[in-house]
Amino acid sequence: MLQSLAGSSCVRLVERHRSAWCFAFLVLGYLLYLVFGAVVFSSVELPYEDLLRQELRKLKQRFLEEHKCLSEQQLEQFLVRVLEASNYGVSVLSNASGNWNWDFTSALFFASTVLSTTGYGHTVPLSDGGKAFCIIYSVIGIPFTLLFLTAVVQRITVHVTRRPVLYFHIRWGFSKQVVAIIHAVLLGFVTVSCFFFIPAAVFSILEDDWNFLESFYFCFISLSTIGLGDYVPGEGYNQKFRELYKIGITCYLLLGLIAMLVVLETFCELHELKKFRKMFYVKKDKDEDQVHIMEHDQLSFSSITDQAAGLKEDQKQNEPFVTAQASTYTDGSANN
């Protein structure tokens, strides 16, 4: 008997704090996923980093042996300066000297990456004025971009997601949940095809050093706004129609970001995902809400009654004065 009571009380306790338990498991799962990613990246990339370090040491040693007039300190000073310039998007290589980072099309591409928070990092402001303007431009532009994307996605979602689902539900009598799932899957497939596979094939042709995997990697990193900057199109030597190419990439990034947001909004509107998200939210207690509403109503009613009582008291205070005046006037008229 005691065991059954204890078990039922534990079950009630768990059910009462179900949202908190789900949130705790969510936090734990996220931390484990971070650790899992760190372990995999470290185990996969660390050997390649070690090989690259060994190769650079051998190249440096061979260069010093072939040029004995140059000391190791002088070489390192030169390399440090070259790497600092490379971090600002400026290269000393002869095959990269023809590409300017701050012509109009490149600046337009940079502005789009700043406002979309992609931020490849291959080109950064060099001057203090440029850095200050970038801060002010971002503070105003990023919320403006969020407002713009929200309005565009809301309008597109009405015509692309809600109306088709409602049409098939009303016209053909299909279940709304089933139609929404099928529609979301088809929309995701079309978006992945049009903004990932096809552009990846195009980039693998236009970029000499990119294969299909690297091109697909660039598309995903860009449209997910991760923007690592290890692959940036239009930076090759003697790129044909470079200005037009940069404008086309800017339009692709903007349209692709809108398409990704539409797909995410479509999936977020699924009934199953809504129920799943609610597991981790804080649930409001209806009794507490009713108590707050009643307290608010009582305060409002008491304030009204207090005001009415005050008005009545004022009237009572004024009434003797009025009656006294009236009695005096009647007495005077009677005497006359």
Image: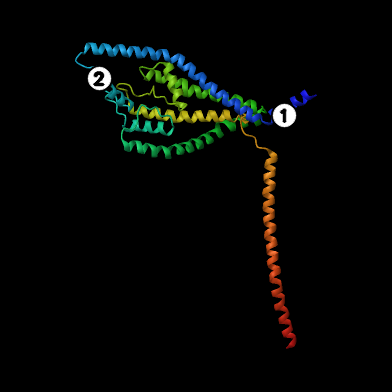
Mark 1: which amino acid? Arg
Label 2, label 1: how far apart the Cα atoms are:
72 Å
Q: Is residue 140 above or below residue 89?
A: below
**Which residue is pictured at 66% across the width and 30% down the height?**
17
Tell which residue pokes out farthest to the front in this image. 2
- Please give the label number shown on residue 73: 2
Which secondary structure, mark 1? helix
- The reply, left or right, for residue 174 in relation to residue 142 is right
User: How would you rate the neighbour count of disc 1 (Cα within 10 Å): few for under 14, some for 14-19, many for 20 or more?
Assistant: few
Q: Which residue is mark 1?
A: 12
Q: Earlier in the sequence, mark 2 or mark 1?
A: 1
Which secondary structure, mark 2? helix
Return the x and y of residue 68 as percentages of the image width and height: 20, 13
Q: Is residue 328 above or below residue 219?
A: below
- The reply, left or right, for residue 37 in relation to residue 326 is left
Return the x and y of residue 71 as percentages of the image width and height: 22, 17
Tell which residue pokes out farthest to the bottom in this image. 336
Mark 2: which amino acid? Gln
Q: Tell me how the rendering is colored.
A: rainbow
Q: Nearer the viewer, residue 28 or 219?
A: 28
Asked whether the viewer can see residue 276, the reply is no
